[in-house]
Image (tube, rainbow, N blue to C red):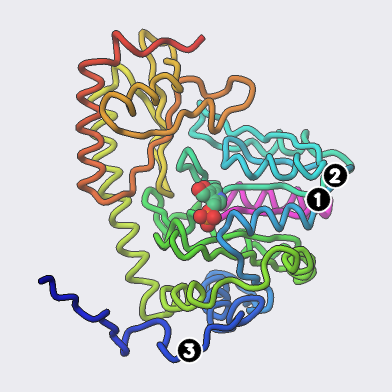
């Protein structure tokens, strides 16, 4: 007979006591959790961030939705950094705002041109949305560009939102570098708001904890009013795990582990790209956990959707088609997004299968983009 071991509870290290009554808990998120986040944002800014300027949400996906739902509507214009997580332009559109995409320059390392930003601004521009570090490219918006964006927005009283879920997974830029990107909240402009999450940098997607943190508390209050209709509070258990993960005795170890893993896996992915320059090219990511790799044949992009389907069906490896998931109007043909910060063995096995496919099926089976 199989002996079932009793569930092991390590009281000393448990993030929540077993005698905790499971109520709605703290409506805006526990003071302890918001306090840890306030400490993280305050550490890099000249001015501290009070914990009341932070609202806990069910992941960053809810944080982004709430923020855009609360801040923009019909008659407003929103400028969104592109390519990016589709939610960041689709939600403003769905609530009736006009959206302009501010395209990062692919042939210049995915950098942003602030002169172009100026040209996109209209009298009704309400919000500029950034994603730093950026999904899918793994590029960063450096400090100097962030400072220029702030100056432009300040001169027209436009609010800036940065989705910072991949912060602080920086592996290709050092904190000592003058262009190391600070959080948008550190740049001394009142109308700045960021969203963040436990899912990426802290590798705890399973607890569904994200947040909105704003310099201007009125933004938090607006979001709070809207959140009342969807979320009474975030699970007390999730809040407790996040509080534990962000506590001073845990956070540095957790981030160290994740940044090291990202760095190690990126080297492995780089070897793959270097071994397949006949078919793929990239701008090596400097941060985050995703890479945007362009696959081509004889200089022409492949059909990335067909490529991803074939790869999945033939060898069981899943990568994301760039034109379908990140492109508008036919952009990013041939690109695929590779999430490379899994366990190292999983990445190695996946890349071995991909190499096998590159040898045996790529040239004959993958069609070119139309
Ligand atoms: C840029 C970006 N923002 C937000 C999210 C949503 O994150 P969460 O898991 O915290 O809801 C994602 C998820 O992939 C993302 O890439």
Q: Could you tell me if the residues under marks 1 and 3 are in contact, i.e. CB atoms within 8 Å?
A: no
Sequence-wise, the earlier of marks 1 and 3 is 3
Give the SS element for disc 2.
loop
Pointers 1 and 2 in contact (CB under 8 A)?
yes
* Foreground disc of the pair 2, 3: 3
- Characterize the local packing of mark 2: few (<14), some (14-19) or many (20 or more) Cα atoms within 10 angstroms: many
Mark 2 CB within 8 Å of ligand 1: no
- Farthest residue to the front: give it: 1
Counting other residues with Cα less than 10 Å from the Cα at mark 3, is it few (<14), some (14-19), or many (20 or more)?
A: few
Pointer 1 local density, CA inside 10 Å: few below 14, some 14–19, many at least 20: many
Q: Which residues are magenta?
A: 143-165
Asked whether 137 or 361 is in front, the reply is: 361
- x then y, percent, for residue 208: 51, 63
Quick check: 7 above or below 330? Answer: below
SS class of the residue under badge 3?
loop
Q: Please tell me whether mark 1 sits on a helix, a strand or a loop.
A: loop
Mark 3 = which residue? Answer: 20
Using the rendered view, name the quadrant where residue 96 is placed: top right
Q: Is residue 155 magenta?
A: yes
Is residue 53 visible in the rendered image? The answer is: yes
Residue under the point 75% across and 41% down: 94
Q: Which image quadrant for residue 121?
A: top right
Q: Which residue is mark 1?
A: 72
In the picture, measured across the screen, residue 79 lies left or right of residue 279, that is right
Q: Which residue is mark 2?
A: 76
Image quarter in which the N terminus is found = bottom left
């Amino acid at each position: 007979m199989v002996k079932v071991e009793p569930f092991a509870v390590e009281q000393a290290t448990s993030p929540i006591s077993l005698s905790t009554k499971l109520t709605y808990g703290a409506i805006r998120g526990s003071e302890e959790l918001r306090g840890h986040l306030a400490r993280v944002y305050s550490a890099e800014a000249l001015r501290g961030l009070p914990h009341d300027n932070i609202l806990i949400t069910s992941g960053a996906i809810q944080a982004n939705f709430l923020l855009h739902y609360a801040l923009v509507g019909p008659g407003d214009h929103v400028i969104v950094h592109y390519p990016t997580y589709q939610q960041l332009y689709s939600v403003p559109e769905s609530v009736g705002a006009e959206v302009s995409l501010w395209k990062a320059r692919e042939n210049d390392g995915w950098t942003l041109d602030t002169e172009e930003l100026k040209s996109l601004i209209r009298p009704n521009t309400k919000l500029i949305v950034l994603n730093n570090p950026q999904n899918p490219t793994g590029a960063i918006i450096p400090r100097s560009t962030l400072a220029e964006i702030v100056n432009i927005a300040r001169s027209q009283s436009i609010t800036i939102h940065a989705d910072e879920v991949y912060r602080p997974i920086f592996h290709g830029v050092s904190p000592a570098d003058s262009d190391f990107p600070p959080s948008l909240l550190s740049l001394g402009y009142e109308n700045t708001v960021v969203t963040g999450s436990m899912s990426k940098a802290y590798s705890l997607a399973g607890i569904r904890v994200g947040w909105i943190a704003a310099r201007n508390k009125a933004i938090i209050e607006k979001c709070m009013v809207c959140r009342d209709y969807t979320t009474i509070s975030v699970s007390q258990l999730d809040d407790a795990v996040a509080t534990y993960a962000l506590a001073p005795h845990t956070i540095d170890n957790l981030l160290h582990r994740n940044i090291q893993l990202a760095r190690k896996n990126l080297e492995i992915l780089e070897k793959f790209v270097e071994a397949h320059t006949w078919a793929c090219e990239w701008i090596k990511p400097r941060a985050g956990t995703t890479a945007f790799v362009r696959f081509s044949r004889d200089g022409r992009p492949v059909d990335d959707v067909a490529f991803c389907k074939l790869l999945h069906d033939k060898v069981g490896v899943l990568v994301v088609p760039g034109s379908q998931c990140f492109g508008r109007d036919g952009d990013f043909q041939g690109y695929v997004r590779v999430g490379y910060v899994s366990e190292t063995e999983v990445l190695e096995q996946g890349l071995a299968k991909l190499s096998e496919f590159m040898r045996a099926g790529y040239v004959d089976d993958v069609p070119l983009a139309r």
